[in-house]
Image (cartoon, grey):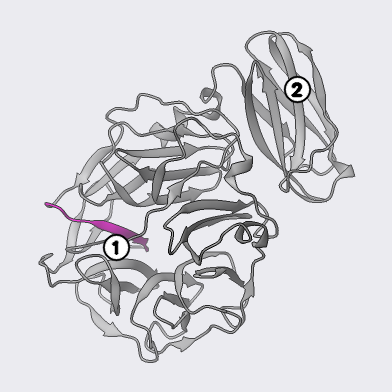
């Protein structure tokens, strides 16, 4: 059974809901089919379900079974999918969505499957990740991480530096491979040969019980992790904007009203656009179009519960635990719901150039006159001298920030006016 993870929105901005009824549409339904994972290759988009493998060749609009094993109580469920060349890999669990049946491989677009795994001594595979021509498997029964360089025929254990052998998540960004273990987070930059523990002591020192990371997301320099304390069952989240060099907890942020009680069920990151799905009594999907600084809901019309999200061509595709597969056009969600709509009082804050190299112009618009302040902090929360604080007229304004005085890195620019705040991320590169 999957653990619940409390969802804390990583934002300093306002939360608002937009009427998007009908923008999510059901693309596939077959009883109570559960869709837990997606993988793409040159053929199309594959979905791993409790009944077998589906394929869409039109970015999630229509689906057909490549292999249907019926979904009866004794049949396996697909826990993770990965594509490498002409091979498709599936981590198999039982019907109740627990891993433990190893890995299958298909060489014919998912029509037939063969067990593989010589050297894979831990059959509880939780994650599959591909970097170049190498596939990695994260396992949860003492194996840690395994690597194959011959399309899954043979596997070797690669856990030098991993202090704990239970790995719940693997994600990759370029050559960086991140592992979520029961005792923290690890990074490998050499295909798993060695692992380095990421320093999260400022977070873990406040945890009194054994804990493990149960959700992990990465995009460029952003790394997001959720933790679960094993004995107490309490949950939380911490995040990094600099590849794990420094960390923050959501407790230091001004959280949107009502956004702190949901359980994360899926997410997908595409450039500066981040979609997060979560559920409590109801299910929600949130969208950030500025790398996580501001969020709004793109919920209406979606399935009751979402367990997997992916982007395929012009669409975002959602796998539901009870409602099949749903699809929405990215242009409907992103194009019609820009960051400028997330606040009725403050909007349109931007910087130019971005990344900044020296002097950068920070522009913003106020819909009405009032006191306004503009401040910049680094990701550790250290504030630079206040850029601006004055009574301003309604309309556009511009303030210049001399970034040449500050080291390269990620900074947060926060505008406050009318009792509300909006934050933008600014990258400084020298």
Residue 77's x, y, as percent? 23, 67
Q: Is residue 75 left or right of residue 127?
A: left
Q: Which mark is residue 373?
A: 2
Whether residue 409 is visible here, answered yes or no, is: yes
The magenta-colored residue range is 31-41
Residue 36 among those drawn in magenta: yes
Position of 46 relative to 341 (above/below): below
Write down the residue under mark 1. 1
Q: Nearer the viewer, residue 370 or 39?
A: 370
Residue 247, by quadrant, is bottom right
Q: Nearer the viewer, residue 375 or 257?
A: 257
User: Disc 2 on helix, strand or loop?
Assistant: strand
Residue 381's x, y, as percent? 73, 43
Residue 344's x, y, as percent? 54, 17
Q: Which mark is residue 293?
A: none
Q: Nearer the viewer, residue 201 or 224?
A: 201
Q: Is residue 226 left or right of residue 113?
A: right
């Amino acid at each position: 059974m999957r653990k619940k993870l409390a969802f804390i929105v990583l934002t300093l901005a306002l939360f608002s809901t937009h009427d998007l009824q009908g923008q999510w549409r059901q693309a596939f339904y077959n009883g109570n089919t559960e869709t837990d994972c997606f993988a793409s290759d040159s053929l199309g988009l594959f979905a791993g379900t409790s009944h077998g493998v589906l394929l869409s060749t039109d970015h999630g609009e229509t689906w057909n079974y490549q292999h249907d094993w019926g979904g009866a109580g004794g049949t396996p469920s697909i826990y993770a999918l990965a594509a490498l060349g002409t091979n498709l890999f599936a981590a198999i669990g039982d019907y109740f969505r627990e891993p433990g049946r190893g890995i299958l491989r298909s060489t014919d677009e998912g029509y037939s499957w063969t067990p593989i795994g010589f050297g894979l001594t831990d059959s509880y595979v939780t994650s599959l990740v591909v970097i170049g021509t190498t596939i990695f498997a994260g396992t949860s029964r003492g194996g840690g991480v395994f690597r194959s360089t011959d399309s899954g025929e043979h596997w070797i254990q690669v856990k030098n530096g991993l202090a704990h052998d239970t790995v719940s998540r693997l994600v990759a960004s370029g050559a960086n491979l991140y592992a979520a273990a029961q005792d923290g987070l690890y990074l490998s930059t050499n295909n798993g040969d060695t692992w380095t523990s990421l320093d999260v002591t400022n977070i873990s020192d406040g945890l009194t019980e054994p804990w493990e990371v149960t959700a992990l997301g990465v995009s460029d320099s952003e790394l997001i992790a959720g933790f679960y304390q094993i004995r107490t069952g309490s949950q939380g989240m911490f995040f990094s904007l600099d590849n794990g060099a420094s960390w923050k907890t959501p407790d230091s942020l001004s959280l949107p009203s009502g956004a702190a009680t949901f359980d994360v069920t899926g997410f997908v990151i595409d450039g500066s656009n981040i979609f997060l799905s979560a559920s409590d009594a109801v299910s929600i999907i949130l969208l950030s179009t500025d790398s996580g600084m501001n969020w709004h809901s793109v919920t209406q019309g979606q399935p009751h519960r979402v367990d997997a999200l992916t982007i395929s061509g012009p669409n975002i595709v959602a796998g539901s635990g009870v409602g099949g597969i749903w699809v929405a056009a990215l242009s409907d969600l992103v194009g019609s719901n820009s960051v400028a709509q997330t606040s009725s009082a403050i909007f349109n804050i931007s910087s130019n150039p971005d990344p900044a190299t020296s002097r950068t112009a920070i522009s913003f618009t106020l819909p009405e006159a009032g006191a306004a302040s503009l401040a910049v902090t680094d990701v550790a929360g250290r504030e630079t001298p206040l850029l601006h604080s004055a009574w301003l007229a309604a309309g556009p304004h511009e303030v210049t920030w001399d970034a040449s005085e500050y080291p390269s890195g990620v900074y947060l620019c926060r505008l406050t006016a009318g009792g509300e705040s909006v934050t933008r991320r600014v990258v400084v590169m020298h």
